[in-house]
């Protein structure tokens, strides 16, 4: 199975998008009739950045005078290069716009962008306290707030470059604590688990999923009983379908057989704060307090720039696995620093500053403004799924569990459906609506798609990730565009 939006059809879609937004020669122009207005990039926060920079500079008032400003000639050269960069950056899909629903690309909150830029004037390195005292303290506070969101008053954890590194550290610890034992994850868990297990020299096996894309408990139970398992990875929102594995039952099996459980919540973890989840989905998120380790990506639903992941361990004693002695790096550090509990060395302190500032503005609490944004994403997915199910043109793959919707045009056979899916993918992009394509196996859909002729073992479906709160206001426009190209 695969999810993509940048294959050969995607290249044509990108060309169409450029014409719609910028004209055939790449220069800005009025949008064609029937298209949506060009997106407007938020810039008012730049004035706040200048104000904050002046405040930051006061911290260096006692130093000898040093003129770090660019000369007029240097400034003009920088300007010339930036004005080359800007038009080249047009060669992108319109990720910040609500009509982009293809992948998990959520615009950073303005405060995250500004705080990140502010920190860049110091450019701290959170590998050691000597490289980033303030940003290291902010990282510890921000990570503690994430841990508290999952019910962990004590923990060990830090930020990473993304979910891949967060999962790598969790599997590395699992391998150290269960040497020679097999890692299990569902067949539609993120592909990095298999890849990372190979990198770490760990045995890895897939567990089949049920008709809702969740780890099949009977298959999991059978595999555990055969022995040799050390860790089960529960996916809290698959990137394919948004499916949430049945964590309470997985934890019960793990306790019975003394196994570790790692939760890959890179995409879905923040939905623990959302309203309107199904009862069993809510129960899965409530059970996160019982896992041994957890990965979450603030650069997905946490409103952060790339890259910002986070790994957490419930038992802080696993920090003993990381300890090392590098006095040349830590000669003046008087306490445990983040570099001692991380496999990564240099890490951008700016990521911690941005996350801390965002969580200061939008606390991670039920019923708050941040949580309401997640709830709106969920409502948007339900609304789009409802419109697709009600009409004669579309066939829903399954009801959305979080904010991912997967569906296909209603054709008689798998091959005809896949062909029509690719055509709609291209035509929708030409109208300014950017989707993704997911290939799903027969086993996942056959139970629901009665009377469908499976002349191929997989079928290409359309996929949207309604990850922006604004999508709740754009469902009608998205659906109208789909109907027009269908």
Image: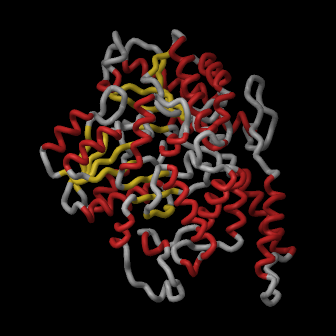
Q: Nearer the viewer, residue 289 or 439?
A: 289
Task: Answer with the quarter of the image where residue 85 lies.
Answer: bottom right
Whether residue 457 is situated above or below residue 198 in the rendered picture: above
Whether 241 is drawn above or below 166: the answer is above
Q: Nearer the viewer, residue 383 or 332?
A: 332
Q: Using the rendered image of the protein, determine whether residue 457 is visible from the camera's viewpoint.
A: no
Is residue 50 among what the camera can see? yes
Query: Residue 317 or 219: which is nearer the viewer?
Result: 317
Q: Where is residue 169? Give x, y as percent.
A: 38, 62
Task: Kindly give the residue lying farthest to the left in the view shown.
Answer: 226
Q: Tell me if residue 310 comes above or below residue 332 in the rendering.
A: above
| Residue drawn at (56%, 51%) of the image | 299
Q: Residue at x 40, y 59 (%)?
A: 313
In x, y percent, where is residue 22?
A: 75, 39
Residue 362 locus on image (x, y percent): 66, 49
How does the figure colour the protein chain or chains? secondary structure
Residue positioned most to the front:
153
């Amino acid at each position: 199975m695969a999810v993509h939006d940048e294959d050969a059809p995607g290249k044509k879609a990108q060309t169409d998008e450029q014409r719609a937004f910028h004209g055939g020669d790449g220069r800005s122009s009025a949008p064609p009739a029937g298209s949506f207005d060009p997106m407007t990039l938020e810039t008012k926060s730049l004035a706040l950045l200048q104000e904050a920079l002046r405040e930051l500079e006061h911290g260096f008032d006692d130093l000898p005078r040093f003129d770090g400003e660019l000369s007029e000639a240097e400034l003009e050269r920088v300007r010339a290069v930036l004005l080359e960069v800007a038009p080249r950056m047009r060669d992108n899909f319109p990720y910040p716009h609500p009509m982009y629903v293809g992948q998990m690309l959520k615009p950073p909150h303005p405060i995250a962008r500004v705080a990140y830029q502010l920190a860049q004037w110091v450019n701290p390195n959170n590998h050691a306290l000597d490289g980033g005292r303030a940003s290291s303290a902010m990282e510890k506070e921000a990570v503690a707030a994430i841990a508290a969101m999952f019910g962990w008053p004590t923990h060990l954890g830090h930020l990473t470059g993304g979910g891949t590194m967060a999962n790598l550290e969790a599997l590395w610890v699992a391998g150290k604590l269960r040497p020679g034992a097999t890692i299990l994850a569902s067949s539609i868990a993120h592909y990095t688990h298999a890849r990372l297990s190979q990198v770490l020299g760990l045995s890895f096996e897939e567990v089949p999923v049920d008709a809702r894309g969740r780890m099949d408990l009977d298959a999991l139970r059978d595999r555990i009983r055969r022995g040799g398992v050390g860790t089960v990875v529960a996916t809290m929102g698959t990137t394919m379908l948004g499916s949430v594995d049945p964590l309470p039952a997985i934890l019960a099996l793990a306790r019975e057989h003394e196994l570790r459980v790692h939760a890959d919540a890179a995409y879905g973890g923040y939905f623990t704060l959302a309203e309107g989840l199904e009862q069993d989905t809510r129960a899965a998120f409530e059970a996160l307090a019982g896992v041994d380790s957890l990965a979450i990506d603030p650069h997905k639903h946490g409103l952060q720039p790339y890259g910002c992941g986070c790994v957490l361990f419930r038992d802080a004693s696993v920090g003993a696995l990381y300890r090392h002695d590098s006095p040349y790096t830590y000669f003046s550090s008087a306490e445990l620093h983040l570099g001692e509990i991380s496999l990564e060395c240099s890490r951008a302190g700016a990521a911690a500053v941005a996350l801390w500032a965002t969580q200061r503005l939008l606390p991670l609490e039920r019923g708050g403004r941040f949580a309401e944004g997640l709830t709106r994403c969920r409502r948007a997915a339900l609304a789009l799924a409802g419109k697709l199910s009600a009409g004669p043109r579309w066939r829903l793959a399954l009801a959305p569990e979080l904010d991912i919707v997967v569906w296909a045009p209603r054709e008689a056979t798998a091959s005809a459906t896949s062909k029509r899916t690719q055509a709609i993918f291209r035509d929708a992009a030409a109208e300014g609506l950017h989707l993704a394509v997911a290939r799903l196996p027969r086993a996942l859909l056959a139970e629901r798609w009665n009377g469908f002729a499976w002349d191929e073992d997989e079928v290409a479906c359309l996929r949207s990730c309604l990850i922006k709160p604004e999508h709740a206001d754009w469902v009608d426009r998205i659906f109208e565009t789909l109907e027009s190209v269908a």
